[in-house]
Amino acid sequence: MGQGLSCGRRHENGLFFSALQNEDVESVRAMVETDSSILHHTTDHQRSTVLHVAAANGQIDILSMLLGRNANPDILNRHNQTPLMLAAMSGRVDCVLKLIEAGANILMFDSKHRRTCLHYAAYYGHSDCLQAILSAAHTTPVSDSWGFARFVNIRDGDGSTPLHLASRQNQPQCVRILLINGALVCVSTCSCPGSSPLHLAARGGSLDCVRELLAWGADRFQFDSYGRIPFKVALKHKHQACAALLNPSSPEPLVWPSPLKLIIELDPDAKVLLEKALMDANMKREKAILMEKFITPPCPLKSDAHIDAYDDNDLASEDIDTELCCICFEQMCNIEAQPCGHRMCAHCTLTLCCHKKPNPTTACPTAPVCPFCRSSIAQLLAAEVKSNDFVDQEISPLKLKGLRTSNFNEENSSLKSLSAMFGKLSEQNPGKCV
C-alpha cells in the first residue's frame, strides 16, 4: 500500500512540474488550489521547489501567482539556495524584482560557495539584476543589520567580494556598477593567493575591467601573496595588452576622484560629461602606450583615423560661437563651478580634481578650488550652452569650421612667407635694419 501511495504522489508531482515547465498557469493554479502542500514538493536531484523552477526560468506569471498565495520567498533547495539566487544566476530581473517586492532576504548565503544573490549576479554578469539587488540594499532592514557598504563588499566562502568575481569573470559593466556603489577596489581575496580585483582582471586578460579598475584608483604596485604585481600576472598569462597598461613605467591613468563628495553626488548631466572626459583622456593614454609597445606605423592606423574623424565631426557639430575654455582654449565650456559660477571644460575640471590618485590612508581630501577666483567649489553642474542666433542657419557648422580652419591656415602661411622674406632680406643686408 505504501508503495502505491508513493507512486501516486510521484505521478502527481510529475504532472505538476510538467505543467510548470510548459508554463500552464491555469493547471498550476488548479493543482495548488486542490492541494496547497504541493508547493513544498521538490525535484529529485536539486530538491528545487516550484518557486525555484519558476524563478530560474523567468516564469513571472506563475511566480506572481505563487507569491500571491503566501509562498515562502526564501524557501531553500538542496544547496540552501533561495529562488532569488537562482533568478540572479539566470538574469531574470523581473523575477528578482518580484521576489524582492515579496520580501525575499538578500542577505542569505548558500551552502555551496557561501555566496549571496549579489555574488551570483556579479559572477554571471547580469548588471540589471545586480543594480536591482543593490537598490534593495538601501532599505531599512539591510541598513540596520549590515549597512550598505558592508553588503557591497561581502565575502563568499573563498574570501572573494562581488568585485573580485566580476573582475575574474570579465564583467566590466558589473565592475563599474559595484565601484560606483562603493566596492573596495584594492581589497585582497583569500583565494587566488591574495589577489586584488586588478590581479584577477590581469589574469583573465580583461582590458575593459583593467580600465575600469585603474580609473577608480586600483594600485598597480599592490602585491599578492607571491609578491607579484598585476603587471607580472598579466605577463605570466601572456596578456600583452593588459601588461602594457599595467607596466609601472607607463604613465599613470587619470583617476576618478571617488572620495570627493562633490564628485560622488554630482548633477547627472555633469557626471556624464566628466565620465566621458575621463574615458577620452585614458583612451588617448592607452592608445599611445599600446602603439609604442606593439606597433610603430609610418602612417596613422585606419582605426585611429576613424576616431580622429569622429572627434572632428563631433567638434564640428558644435556652434562656432560656443564659449571656449579659458584654461586650455581647446574645449567648450560645459561645466559650471558653484557657487562662483565660473565655467571650464570637463577635461580641465578633471585635471583640477584628479591631478593625482587619492591616498586611501589619508583623510578625505579637501574640495578643489576654482582656478579663477580661488574659492572652494561646492558643486559641479552642467553648464548651459549658449547658441548664436545671428549665425546663418543655411551654413552648417562643419562648413563654418572648415572656413575658420582654412582662414587660419591661410593667415599662418602668409605669416610664414613674410618671415621667410624678412629672413632673406636680413641675410642680404646684414648691416641694415629692415
Image (spheres, rainbow, N blue to C red):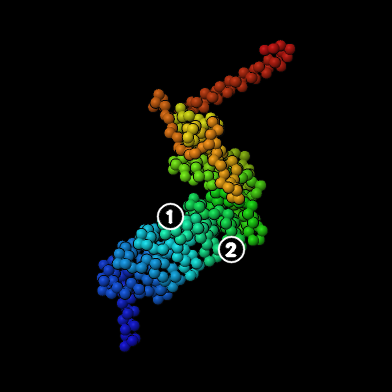
**Which residue: 43% across, 32% down?**
385
Q: Which residue is mark 2?
A: 190
Look at the numbered disc 1 and give the secondary structure of its residue.
loop
Which image quadrant for residue 8? bottom left
Mark closer to the observer (1, 2): 1
In the displayed structure, would residue 398 be above or below residue 103? above
* Labelled disc at residue 220: none
Q: Residue at x 54, y 31 (%)?
A: 372
Mark 1 surroundings: few (<14), some (14-19) or many (≥20) residues within 10 A = some
In the displayed image of the protein, which residue is found farthest to the top?
A: 432
Could you tell which of marks 1 and 2 lies nearer the N-terminus? Answer: 1
Residue 183 visible in this rendered orientation of the protein = yes
Residue drawn 42% across and 59% down?
141
Q: Residue 181, how many percent across, how many down?
A: 48, 52
Which sits in the foreground, 199 or 144? 144
Mark 2 surroundings within 10 Å by alpha-carbon count, few (fewer than 14), some (14 through 19), many (20 or more):
some
Instruction: Tell me which residue sits at (43%, 62%) in the image.
Output: 106
Label 1 amino acid? His
Residue for badge 1: 138
The quadrant of the image that shows the C terminus is top right
Q: Are marks 1 and 2 in contact (CB under 8 Å)?
A: no
Q: Residue 63 appears at what percent x and percent y?
A: 33, 64
Describe the element under mark 2 as helix, strand or loop. loop
Residue 202 place in picture, x, y as percent: 59, 55
Q: Is residue 237 left or right of residue 382?
A: right
Q: CA distance from mark 1 to mark 2?
A: 28 Å
